[in-house]
Image (spheres, helix red, strand yellow):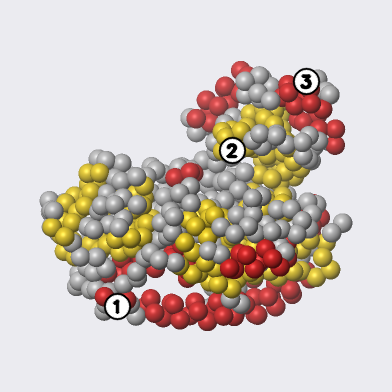
Amino acid sequence: MTIWPQPRLLPCGDRALSVELGDEVNRELNARVLALEYLLQQKHLPGVGETVPSYRALLVYYDPLVVSHEALCATLRELWARARPEVLPPARTVELPCCYGGELGFELEAAAQKIGLSPDEMARLHAEADYYVYFVGFTPGLPYMTGMPDRLTIPRLTNPRTKTPPGSVAIGGVQCCIYPIESPGGFWVLGRTPVRLYDPIAPDPILLRAGDHVRFRAIDRAEYESIAASVEAGRYTPRIAG
Amino acid sequence: MSILIIQDAGPLTTIQDLGRFGYLRVGIPTSGPMDHDAFLVANRLVGSPDTAAALECTLIGPRVEFTDERLVAITGADMAPTVNGGAAPTWQGLRVKAGDVLRLGPAKSGVRAYLAVGGGIETPLVLGSRSTYVRGRLGGLEGRALRRGDRLPVGSVPAARPRRVHPDRVPVYGGDVTVAVVLGPQDDRFTAAGIAAFLEGPYEMLPQSDRMGARLKGPFIEHTRGHDIVSDGIAMGAIQVIGEGQPIVLLADRQSAGGYTKIGTVCSFDIGRIAQVKPGGRLRFHRVTVAEAHAMLRDRRRALDGTIE
């Protein structure tokens, strides 16, 4: 696997730098990125601003008039040496109900046909897996996840959609994602969750975090509608363990 | 409470403060003013703290009615403002009274004008900021651009004397703009010819540009091996080069992460200058080192602090 023997500290203009730890999608590598972020936050170094973890790199914003580039690089190298998954707090597991197929999972049938499974079999395999959230972003609250059985690997759509409804659970390549807001998309939509991943008027607007595990629970349309109504009324709390 | 009445909104007038910090790691952009310096100067001219919220007007300005006496200031793009039909000065504090109507027209130069009012605009803080992020329906007024008939709460007026920017220090928009860039984080994914073409330019601003990014058209930038990378974080000002070898400079409402190569990053102090380039306007990239960029940042910060008399 491609994990660099030393971190690469790459400039991103005058106010940010990227700490690149490797060059692939891999849980061990990502856990080190999250551990580095965690250690940096614990350190409360003046001049260090926001951090943005991704698969294999940590973007660090800083104020060069408060902390010098050299001092920040030295700190990051030192923290990198200790950035092991063990330093992280225990991971959470978030359960998300998902209604597969039909008009909510409008590409389940075509996707199943593409990889030679029945729609039911495909939905079952998808719902059984344990998903890991590498990071959250692109649009507010969107989780980048893997965890599907290899059997579900599928090429992305040739012509991306311009609009994907919020809550859509979709797959492409070995990845699975959920669209929190209406956005373009190149993944196959297998189902929809009534749970909001992004709620702009909630005190804590984002449900999922980097490092979380996600389990889908297959539900029928009636249960979807009932949960959607509870969500709308502000009476629904997703099940979170850990 | 005092209010400001929007009689006509213009195509994209939004409430912005310095931005929403702490949520990039979950995909919520900072937002905030596209031209940071012009925004700060507007606030300072009316005696407001830098953190106060003001209006960002895009290409065509709004018509605004005041309901009490206060100090206002207009900076940024030249939208030939008038108060009750008479020409109003820009880049200086201006006293208005109840019933006065301020009108900002189409931008004669620049793209984004800022209207600050003494006391600041006091719509609710959302996640610690009043900045509007339209795509995420967050902040500002109901998370959207302003519309005719909106009534904006404004804070109580601090005692402030009108101040001005010395005419020699007022920025001039238009003409070819050159901005400083630091190469990286993926400059190693471009050929020497690709980097030379990028630094040679010029690039033309395309009309599809918005608060997410400035889409540019110009010399082809050649990759070594494709434009896809393992997705990573996108810094403010990052220059993504997509399949067609054309750059996009990612700005205040940018996506937090993405999977395209980034050849360089526009320095923070020059991002506002990109925000004022009209569609069809041209810009070039000038390469600087990180150390040079930090020295320039220090100089620009000092100049900004001395800009108001």
Q: Earlier in the sequence, mark 3 or mark 2?
A: 3
Inspect the image, locate mark 2, and give the three-letter code of the amino acid beneath it: Pro
Residue A193, position as x, y percentages in the image:
63, 30
Parent chain of label 2:
A
The residue depicted at 45 percent of the width and 67 percent of the height is B177
Marks 2 & 1 on one chain: no
Q: Residue at x 37, y 65 (%)?
A: B173
Picture coordinates of residue A119, whole percent (x, y): 77, 21
Give the residue pinned by disc 1.
Answer: B168
* Element at label 3: helix
**Residue at 16%, 64% in the rendered image:** B95
Side of B24 relative to B228 (left or right) = left
Q: Are marks 3 and 2 in contact (CB under 8 Å)?
A: no
Foreground tag (2 vs 1) = 1
User: Which amino acid, mark 3?
Assistant: Asp
Residue B82 shown left or right of residue B239 in the figure: left
Residue B272: name its quadrant. bottom left
Residue B187 drawn at (x, y percent):
69, 65
Dot 3 and dot 2 within a common chain: yes
Considering only vertical position in the picture, is A27 above or below A195? below
- Depth check: A211 or A53 in front? A53
Quadrant location of residue A6? bottom right
> In screen coordinates, is A167 left or right of B208?
right
Residue at figure coordinates x 70%, y 34% from the top left: A158
For disc 2, the marked residue is A184
Chain identity of mark 1: B
Farthest right residue in view: A1
10 Å crowding of disc 2: few (<14), some (14-19), many (20+): few
Q: Which residue is mark 3?
A: A120
Horizontal and vertical percent position of residue B4: 23, 50
State if disc 3 and disc 1 touch (CB < 8 Å). Answer: no
The answer to whether the residues at label 2 and label 1 have Cβ atoms under 8 Å apart is: no
